[in-house]
Amino acid sequence: MSFAPFDWIDDEARRRAAAGLVRALRPRGAEAELLDLASNDYLGLTRHPEVVEAAAGAAHRWGAGATGSRLVTGTTELHAELERELADFCGFEAALVLSSGYAANLAALTALTGRGSLIVSDAGNHASIVDGCRLSRAETAVVPHADPDAVAKALHAHDGRALAVTDSVFSVDGDAAPLAALAEVCRAADAALVVDDAHGLGVLGEGGRGALAAAGLAGGAGTVATLTLSKSLGSQGGAVLGPARVIDHLVNTARTFIFDTGLAPAAAGGALGALQLLRREPERAARAREVATTLYGRLTAAGLTSARPDAAVVSVRAPSADAAVRWAADCRAAGVVVGCFRPPSVPDGISRLRLTARADLTEEQITGAVATIVATAPREALAPLS
């Protein structure tokens, strides 16, 4: 009898291929040969000389790795400085740096809940939030997208510890959560509000201080923010920001912090360098939003269907998953890299091209990108112009 415990994988692969959902890695070279509208480098800082030098300098001084978990040998003075700077910049009492934004969401949701508590989660939340809810062992109520009334109903139906969690800016369509209304609902129910500001930091708020700062909620007694350092700050890693007692609680209880190796010094140094640069050049945040609005306006004027961006993500609808894949491939062949979102990445089942506006894009690059996207668009994606 043959031993083939993984034959089922072949069946799964055939089903993915039939549905047009095959994904593959595409290694890129070090040199930027194509125009990038797919990464999350919103402020154009990943290759900025100051940020690169800060990362390299940190590696030279502290070494290639953190050497251990944060509670053993993995916390350097650099990590502590980055945490102070993040908390101060975003308007919170304290911050805790982790190895990724994914780990930050898992840390916050698992450490602040547990059996007998309730998490109310927006249907459009990122996969890291979904997984945090699953791992928390709390009861989870998934409510309709951007619906504070549904959040209120779920919170008031529960007797005990509870929190609501939402992305500040949703990564699929780029729309912003109604944070002020959600905060009011949470206050009325004596519940905490956890906000993943991955796509708001560096883009929203005064000088890019984030969506919570823009909504006047930063530093609130019942508010916790999670961040990634890999988007606007051009580096890698994540963080949780909130009241000092919340951060101390995570240090003592969050498994993705306690049992994970600390963030590499180069990543911490790069993020700190980017944050310091953003303090000096706050206009980058407004420029990213301006580029997003320009892309949206020109693409919709050409007949494409796009969601109005609230930050730096511009979503353009495709007729099908196969059409989205072909469209993205044709854009790449023409010199423009765009994101391609298909099920299960899109909760509504509608495939999209996902464009990310960057603060460093020139008018010539924007014009060329729009022309390429429109010229390669499937016929069904273009609405007839009156």
Image: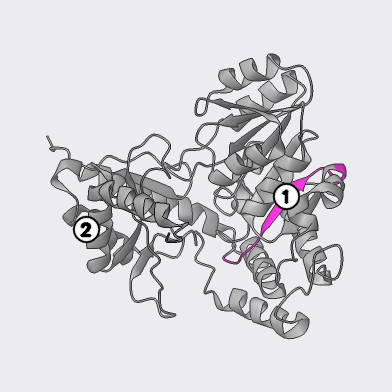
Secondary structure found at label 1: strand
In the displayed structure, 283 sits above or below 144; it is below
In the rendered view, would you say 38 is above or below 78? Answer: above
Q: Which residue is mark 2?
A: 371
Q: Which mark is residue 113?
A: none
**Badge nearest the viewer, 2 or 1:** 1
Residue 236, located in which quarter of the rendered image?
bottom right
In the image, taking residue 137 as reference, residue 383 lies left or right, namely left
In this rendering, is residue 71 above or below 164? below
Q: Which residue is mark 1?
A: 240
The image quarter containing residue 189 is top right
- Residue span colored magenta: 234-245
Residue appearing at x 27%, y 65% in the figure: 332
Amino acid type, callout 2 = Ala
**Can you give x and y, in whole percent of width and height, for residue 159 in the image?**
77, 16
Q: Is residue 162 above or below residue 280?
A: above
Q: CA distance from mark 2 to mark 1?
A: 40 Å
Image quarter for residue 140?
top right
Count neighbours of disc 1 (C-alpha within 10 A) and say few if under 14, some if 14 to 19, many if 20 or more. many
Q: Secondary structure at mark 2?
A: helix
Q: Which numbered disc, 2 or 1, marks the residue that appears first in the sequence?
A: 1
Instruction: Report the side of 316 relative to 381 (left or right).
Output: right
Magenta-drawn stretch contains 27: no
x and y, in percent, of residue 203 in the image? 54, 51
Instruction: Give the amino acid type for the residue marked by disc 1 in the picture.
Output: Val
**How far across and down, in percent of the image, does residue 232 sit?**
56, 59
What's the residue at 52%, 28% (across, down)?
Answer: 146
Which residue is drawn at the image coordinates 81% and 34% (left, top)?
A: 221
Q: Quadrant of the C terminus?
A: top left
Looking at this rendering, what residue extends furthest in the front direction?
1
Residue 379 visible in the current orientation = yes
**Camera sees residue 370:** no
